[in-house]
Image (tube, grey):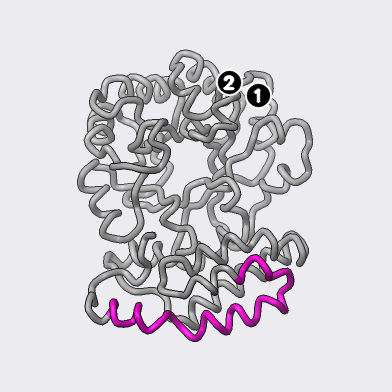
Amino acid sequence: MKIYPDNSVILAPLAGYTDLPYRSSAIRHGCLFAFTEMIDAGSLVFGHGKTLAMLNRGRNESFLGVQIVGSEHEILKKATRIISQHDVNVLDFNLGCPAKKVARKGEGATLAKRTEEAIRAFEVIVRNSQIPVTVKTRILDEEDPAPTIHLVKMLVDAGAAAVTLHGRIMSKFYSGDVKSRIIAEVRGNVKTQLIANGGVFSSSTCETLRSETGCGCVMVARGAMGNPWIFDEIREGRNFNPPTPDGLADEIGRHVAEMAELCGEEIGVRISRKLMIDYVKGRGYPGELRNSVCKIKTLEELKPFLDNVRIGPTPRYGKWIEANPDAPRRLMV
């Protein structure tokens, strides 16, 4: 049984980003499948209230996936049982995170390199889960598909209901070309649902990844940062120029307001500063506007920022758009 319908577009679990307001923003623009932030299994087990709250499902969420990272079997067992008691659809095991703080503990992408250990940890999760279990991992070699095929096959044999595969090795983090050929080789050698991941920033890059890998389902990560409209783009199958300055300001205002409601105004606005920058970055706004974000502490102080967003990009950027009418308005810088 497939976890996702054919050609689904899934919002990736992004540490520090995909909280409830972030997912709600994506849902408003056509996202049907989204994950919580990556959750540390130990933090969940040892009762950190903030971590437990990350499992809460929004009223408008028809689907919710949860991803955990860890390596200690007893901790993974307990975390899995906690998650199984909540209203979630899928439990995903992270074998792809390249962050140093994760790597130092032998987790994420580092654990994936130790295939046998990774499989044993994954089997603990499968045995203790009451919901379908999936995996997100990375290719293990840029030239030879065999190590990645071996890893994915073992994960499937251990009970993976689906596997998401990022097309870069651990040392590349999120830079460089996505090795679509490796993903395609894996796709041709496994029977479970394979979701392609990496380099999706528009409808055209999504279609390229699909055609080069043979995977109908894709997972969007950084391409959704400050750009929930990407789900509209992919659904409609064309690159277009979202949003209008008013639409951009409205989305920022709503997103920050929801963060303030969730976390309290002071903390919510402070956390939202990085989101404000993501929303305006690469859209032709002057650097002074981005620099002003660090001074915003309240919803009232947010209003002048939104007023400046409504004014629109600089004239220089407008001339560039006129000269390049088919280019996406959001420049990836």
Q: Helix, strand, or loop for circle 1?
A: helix
Q: Which residues are magenta?
A: 292-321
Label 2: few (<14), some or many (≥20) within 10 Å? some
* Residue 276 picture location, percent across and down: 57, 67
Q: Residue 59 lies in what quarter of the image?
A: bottom right
Residue at mark 2: 124
Label 2 amino acid?
A: Val
| Number of numbered callouts drawn | 2
Label 1 amino acid?
A: Lys
Return the mark for residue 77.
1
- Magenta segment, prevailing SS (helix, strand or loop): helix
CB contact under 8 Å: marks 1 and 2: yes
**Residue sitting nearer the eye, 91 or 75:** 75
Q: Helix, strand, or loop for circle 2?
A: helix
Q: Residue at x 46, y 25 (%)?
A: 159
Q: Residue at x 65, y 24 (%)?
A: 77
**Could you tell whether 33 is left or right of 167 in the image?**
right
